[in-house]
Amino acid sequence: MKEINIRDIKENPVSLIADGWGLVTAGNKEKFNTMTVSWGAVGEIWGKDAVFVFIRPQRYTYEFLEKEDVFTLSFYGEEYKKALGFCGKASGRDVNKAAECGFTPLFTDGGVTFEEAKYTIVCRKMASQFIDPRGFEDSAIENNYANNDYHKVYIGEILKVYEK
């Protein structure tokens, strides 16, 4: 992996997240978990390059994001779309998703990513907060929370970016 500036990623960040999906991963060498994300953003806040990821509290990865200061957001080629689908459906409580998908864990900069990633963004948590349903202005958004299981938004400062 070669370190690059976030601005050197030539692919559209909306497309990377919404169409290509990614993995958010947190933990350490002893224990980590990953899950697929298709909601999120890359941008700037408080004078820092940042990512925004959304995790429901019932997801196993939530526990790892709560414990760790560093997490990664990684993106893959189209050939990994089936594996990313699996990582979004299966729970790390029940199965080793990395092993099932043939992903090779890579521990770097206090975070966990996978050798197969096309891009890895290493982040340090700056803030997190549950979505407040009182702030919804669009009923379409409310339709995503029939069980009132609101996402927690994590804002991560981008520490490093790697390209395969």
Image (spheres, rainbow, N blue to C red):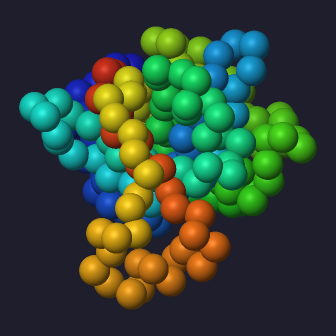
Where does residue 156 sit, x and y in percent of width and height? 35, 33
Residue shown at 39% from the left, 39% from the top: 128
In this view, 93 is above or below 108: below
Q: Residue 131 at x, y = what percent? A: 41, 58
Q: Is residue 135 above or below residue 11?
A: below
From the viewer's side, name the closer residue of 150 and 73: 150
Residue that extends furthest to the left in the rendered view of this protein:
47
Residue 116 in sight here: no
List x then y, in percent, for residue 45: 16, 40
Q: Residue at x 41, y 78 (%)?
A: 141
Residue at (75% x, 59% y) in the render:
89
Judge by depth and name the residue closer to the eye, 140 or 35: 140
Looking at the image, the residue that sits furthest to the front is 134
Q: Is residue 102 left or right of residue 42?
A: right
Is residue 75 among the parts visible in the rendering? Answer: yes
Left or right? Give the position of 31 relative to 96. left
> Relative to 100, is 68 above or below?
above
Identity of the residue furthest to the right in this view: 94
**Residue drawn at (58%, 54%) of the image:** 56
- Count of residue discs: 0
